[in-house]
Image (cartoon, rainbow, N blue to C red):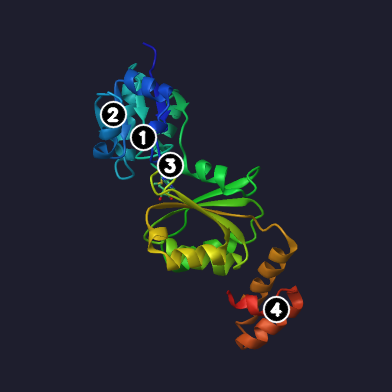
Amino acid sequence: MAAGTLHVVATPIGNLDDLSPRAVASLRAVAAICCEDTRHSRPLLTRYGIDKPLIALHEHNEDAIAARLVERLLAGEDLALVSDAGTPLVSDPGYRLVRAARDAGVRVSPVPGACAAIAALSVAGLPSDRFCFEGFLPAKPAARRARLTELASEPRTLVIYESSHRIEEMLADARVAFGAARRAALARELTKLFETVLDGDLAMLHERVCNDADQRRGEFVLIVAGVGDAVDAKLIEGRRLYAKLSEHLPPSQAAKLAAELSGAPRKDLYGG
Ligand code: SAM
């Protein structure tokens, strides 16, 4: 018997009309749909008159049930994989199931659609010919700052996911790591009622979010320009030197020396 196909189906990131006709047809045709949270996916499916068995597949059980799902695919059943929103596997579960299906020689076919990263990039007005998807940064402050410091010299545009709980502190850390003047755009609640896209430099975005509680609500994608120009490069080098020198010298001397060596303004080396 021929094996079935695993259809990896993108679903909307807010506006339920963003489900493609092909996605609807695929979901109607399969034997069962794997989803992160059955309570979350049911309303979308009901809206499109799709009544199929749902199988919960999330980060805590994916390893355990992937083998059983592959058996069903090998037995000839077609299955679909969706996540709560957007494209499965993009900061969402599904990687282990897709890996297991491919290892078993099962056909895995995409039904593309919404993805918050791509939607944000498409409206940010920042270079998008090359970009670097970082997804969620580490939740712990020290690890997040270390990651941002590493990313400060990345020449490609950066795409970062964030939730409302940490948006303020993440922007504060990004402002320090990349410098207040780095260009960025903050896309919030894309395709939903309160969609906003702020763009400017990181200082301006941070201040907007600090000063306006509405701008801290919802789901966010931060797009940060890569370290493009000479000013940025000087600042990054100045900060690197300051961090090293301040291990051995008082802060004011370390900043003075780092500013002289790098050409960056001394006042910017403390992180403002
Ligand atoms: N798989 C999804 C995709 O394709 O974009 C991402 C899932 S991830 C668990 C959820 C994160 O995506 C949110 O915390 C937020 O950073 C981003 N996100 C999802 N929907 C969004 C929206 N409507 N507007 C802005 N960001 C969104």
Along the line of sight, which residue is nearer the eye, 13 or 83?
13
Name the secondary structure under disc 3.
loop
Check whether the beta carbons of the residues at disc 1 and disc 3 lie within 8 A of each other: no
Label whose residue precedes the other's in the sequence (2 or 1): 1
Name the secondary structure under disc 2.
helix
Residue at disc 1, CB closer than 8 Å to ligand 1: no
Residue at disc 3, CB closer than 8 Å to ligand 1: yes
Q: Which residue is mark 2?
A: 47
Residue type, label 3: Thr
State the image quarter where residue 163 is shown: bottom left
Q: Nearer the viewer, mark 4 or mark 1?
A: 1
- What label does residue 191 carry, if any? 3
Q: Could you tell me how far apart the alpha carbons at marks 4 and 3 are, in whole angstroms?
A: 45 Å
Name the secondary structure under disc 1.
helix
Check whether the beta carbons of the residues at disc 2 and disc 1 lie within 8 A of each other: yes
| Crowd around label 1: few <14 · some 14–19 · many ≥20 (10 Å) | some
Q: Nearer the viewer, mark 4 or mark 3?
A: 3
- What label does residue 258 carry, if any? 4
Q: Position of residue 107 (x, y in %)?
A: 45, 22
Q: Could you tell me how far apart the alpha carbons at marks 2 and 1 are, in whole angstroms?
A: 9 Å
Furthest residue toward top: 1
Q: Residue at x 45, y 27 (%)?
A: 111
Q: Position of residue 133 (x, y in %)?
A: 54, 48
State the image quarter where residue 267 is shown: bottom right
Q: Residue at x 60, y 64 (%)?
A: 178
Q: Could you tell me how far apart the alpha carbons at marks 4 and 2 are, in whole angstroms?
A: 60 Å
Q: Which residue is mark 1?
A: 16
Q: Position of residue 39 (x, y in %)?
A: 24, 38
